[in-house]
Image (cartoon, helix red, strand yellow):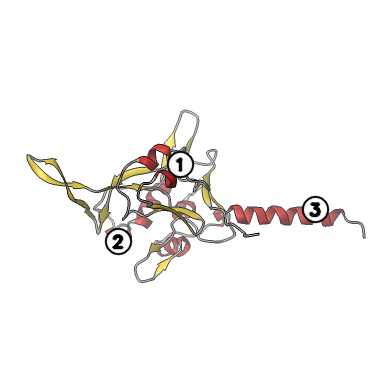
C-alpha cells in the first residue's frame, strides 16, 4: 500500500499566548528579506503583511494561520490552479494568483488574506487594468492571496533555496525545542515565540510516536 504523506501544520495554545505579535513580525521579516527587512532599523519600505495574525477576544488571544488541510477547499476553487500540495504543505503560487478571492471565501479558518504584491520593496502593478488615481488613470496594484507556507522554500541571501529551518537560522531566529516534529524545519513564528505557544505538528511523526508508545506498552505487559 502506498504511504501517503500527510501535511504538517502549526497549532497555537491560547493559554500560553501573551499577544506580543512576535510571530507576526518574524513571519513578515523572513518572507521579505529581499525588501531589505531585518537588515537594519528603518529599512522597511513595504507594509507589514504577515502570513498569520493574532486575534483577540474577551477570553483569549492567539495567532491564527493556515492548517494545511488534507482536502484543501481553497485549492478546489482556484480557477488557475495556483494552490498546490507540495512537501507536506499547501502552497500558493503568487505569480499565478489572479486575486479572485475564492480561496479566502471558502477557507473555514479565515486564514487566507489578499494583499498588494511587492517585489524589491516596490508595489507591483497590473499590466493592463487601470484605475482612477490622483486625478488621472494609473495601473491598478496587483493583489494576491497570502497565507502560511510553513516557511518552505525561502531564499536566504548567500545561499540556495533552503528549508524553513535554515531560513529562520539565517534571519537570526533560533530553532526552539518546541518545534514538535523532531527537529525538522521550524517556521519563524514557532522559533521566536517567547512563551512557546506555537508548535509545529507533523502528523506522520505523531503517528510514529503513538505506535512506538503502544509497542512499548505491549512489551511491558509481556511475562518472560
Give the residue drawn at x 45%, y 60%: 164
> Which quadrant of the rendered structure holds the N terminus?
bottom right
Q: Earlier in the sequence, mark 2 or mark 3?
A: 2
Q: CA distance from mark 1 to mark 2?
A: 25 Å
User: Within 10 Å of the Cα at label 2, are there few (<14), some (14-19), or many (20+) other Cα atoms?
Assistant: some
User: Is 34 in front, or is 131?
Assistant: 131
Give the residue drawn at x 86%, y 53%: 221
- Left or right, 33 with respect to 148, comes to left
Q: Earlier in the sequence, mark 1 or mark 2?
A: 2
User: Within 10 Å of the Cα at label 3, are there few (<14), some (14-19), or many (20+) other Cα atoms?
Assistant: few
Q: CA distance from mark 2 to mark 3?
A: 51 Å
User: Is 21 in front, or is 125?
Assistant: 125
Q: CA distance from mark 1 to mark 3?
A: 36 Å
User: Is 144 in front, or is 34?
Assistant: 144
Give the residue drawn at x 80%, y 53%: 217
Question: Label 2, on which residue?
Answer: 34
How far across and how far down the image is residue 36, in percent?
Answer: 28, 59
Q: Earlier in the sequence, mark 1 or mark 3?
A: 1
How far across and how far down the image is residue 20, in percent?
Answer: 42, 43
* SS at mark 3 in the image: helix
Question: Label 1, on which residue?
Answer: 64
How far across and how far down the image is residue 121, in percent?
Answer: 24, 56
Q: Which mark is residue 111?
A: none
Q: Are marks 1 and 3 in contact (CB under 8 Å)?
A: no
Question: Label 3, on which residue?
Answer: 217
- Residue 49, visible in the rendered structure: no
* SS at mark 1 in the image: strand
Amino acid at each position: 500500500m502506498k504511504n501517503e504523506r500527510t501535511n504538517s501544520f502549526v497549532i497555537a495554545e491560547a493559554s500560553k499566548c501573551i499577544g506580543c505579535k512576535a510571530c507576526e513580525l518574524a513571519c513578515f521579516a523572513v518572507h521579505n528579506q529581499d525588501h531589505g527587512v531585518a537588515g537594519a532599523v528603518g529599512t522597511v519600505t513595504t507594509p507589514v503583511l504577515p502570513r498569520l495574525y493574532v486575534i483577540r477576544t474577551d477570553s483569549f488571544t492567539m495567532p491564527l494561520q493556515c492548517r494545511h488541510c488534507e482536502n484543501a477547499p481553497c485549492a478546489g476553487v482556484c480557477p488557475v490552479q495556483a494552490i498546490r500540495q507540495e512537501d507536506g504543505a499547501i502552497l500558493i503560487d503568487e505569480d499565478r494568483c489572479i486575486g479572485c478571492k475564492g480561496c479566502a471565501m471558502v477557507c473555514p479558518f479565515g486564514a487566507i488574506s489578499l494583499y498588494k504584491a511587492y517585489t524589491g520593496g516596490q508595489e507591483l502593478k497590473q499590466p493592463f487594468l487601470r484605475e482612477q488615481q490622483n486625478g488621472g488613470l494609473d495601473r491598478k496594484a496587483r493583489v494576491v492571496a497570502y497565507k502560511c507556507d510553513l516557511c518552505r522554500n525561502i531564499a536566504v541571501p548567500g545561499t540556495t533555496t533552503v528549508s524553513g529551518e535554515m531560513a529562520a537560522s539565517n534571519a537570526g531566529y533560533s530553532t526552539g525545542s518546541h518545534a514538535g516534529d523532531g527537529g525538522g524545519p521550524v517556521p519563524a513564528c514557532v522559533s521566536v515565540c517567547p512563551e512557546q505557544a506555537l508548535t509545529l505538528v507533523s502528523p506522520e511523526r505523531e503517528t510514529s510516536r503513538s505506535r512506538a508508545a503502544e509497542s512499548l506498552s505491549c512489551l511491558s505487559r509481556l511475562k518472560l
